[in-house]
Image (tube, grey):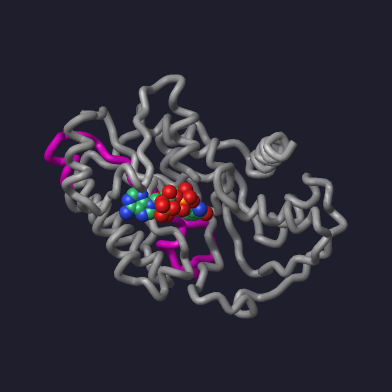
Amino acid sequence: MLARAIAEVLVPREQITGASHVEADITDEKQMRRILEAERPDAVVNAAAFTDVDACETQEDLAFRVNAEGPGILALLCREFDIPLMHISTDYVFDGEKAEPYVEEDEARPLSVYGRSKLEGEREVQRHLDRSWIVRVCGVFGPYRNNFVSLVTELGKKGQPLRIVKDQMLAPTYTFDAAAGIGRILRRGPYGIYHLTNQGFTARIEFTKEILRQAGYENTPVLPISSEETKRPAPRPRNSQLENARLKREKMELLPPWQEAVGRYLKQLAAENR
Ligand SMILES: NC(=O)c1ccc[n+]([C@@H]2O[C@H](COP(=O)([O-])OP(=O)(O)OC[C@H]3O[C@@H](n4cnc5c(N)ncnc54)[C@H](OP(=O)(O)O)[C@@H]3O)[C@@H](O)[C@H]2O)c1
């Protein structure tokens, strides 16, 4: 989802070579070496990951292979070819117990296999490569794959009551806005860790109501439940508020407010369904 948005948003200014899973398996050192040798890019962006958070609980080996070893392989190759690497990471590296939003320097303490594998991926990249950016995003929505906004809209259209957790805070992020921010960091951001989300924080249940309101399905019943009631295999952090402290410190442009981003995505969704 995010990789395609990055390719689309950056292509007017940059020359992009996008590679799908089939074309470029990040765990395959030989294949990645061949691609880097042929392309000799100015920078590599790794948005590949095993992102099924619940499946990671039972497929730990695969999670660590893709989310930790893969980025490590990329980082070593980038070091050899002297190419900077941007690695996309996640709010799930945090346990969500902090009372305030998380800044980049906060200690990561993941709750799930997915979170642990992603944190190990960050560490692999940092261990092998000085010229690297770690960009943590959160609550991502956008075209090319089902996501929270598209699912809520779909259920709203059917008028089905929604059961939504009332105890989870997040910073929703539109892939196209994140892609623009990624472009700016690639062009002038000093190396290191960045939190990159649309501006503003919200409870997931309020996020849901705002999606329904903007989509014109505000009469859809939304029933509050607790995180425990979802009975999902992987625990989720209750607090996924990522403060974009580094962007502010570097005086770089922040992403627009999430409510506005939802509006733009809903228009895109409506146009696709026409
Ligand atoms: N979605 C969110 O809410 C969210 C939140 C926080 C952080 N993130 C992070 O944002 C990044 C992008 O996520 P996304 O939402 O765009 O995920 P996505 O839509 O699931 O895309 C991940 C892509 O990685 C590919 N992939 C899996 N294993 C691979 C491998 N070994 N080599 C190469 N490609 C491989 C997948 O291909 P297949 O489908 O063929 O397996 C898929 O195309 C990830 O780093 C994720 O951890 C996402």
Farthest left residue in view:
80
The C terminus: image quadrant: top right
> Is 108 left or right of 263, judged from the image as shown?
left
Q: Is residue 203 left or right of residue 252?
A: right
**Pick the front one: 138 or 1:** 1
Please tell me in which quadrant of the rendered image residue 11 appears.
Answer: top left
- For the record, the magenta segment spans 76-104
Q: Is residue 250 magenta?
A: no
Estimate the x, y position of residue 14 in percent, counting from the top left: 38, 22
- Residue at figure coordinates x 42%, y 74% from the top left: 57
Compared to residue 34, the image places residue 106 above or below, namely below
Give the camera-side residue of 145 and 44: 145
Q: Is residue 33 visible?
A: yes
- Name the residue furthest right: 219
Residue 137 visible here: no
Viewer-proximal residue among 181 and 266: 266
Query: Residue placed at 35% from the left, 59% from the top?
Result: 118
Which residue is found at the position 42% from the left and 20% from the top? Answer: 13
Question: Residue 116 in the image: x percent, y percent?
Answer: 35, 67
User: Where is residue 74 shown, x and y percent of the image?
Assistant: 23, 46
Viewer-closest of 101 and 33: 33
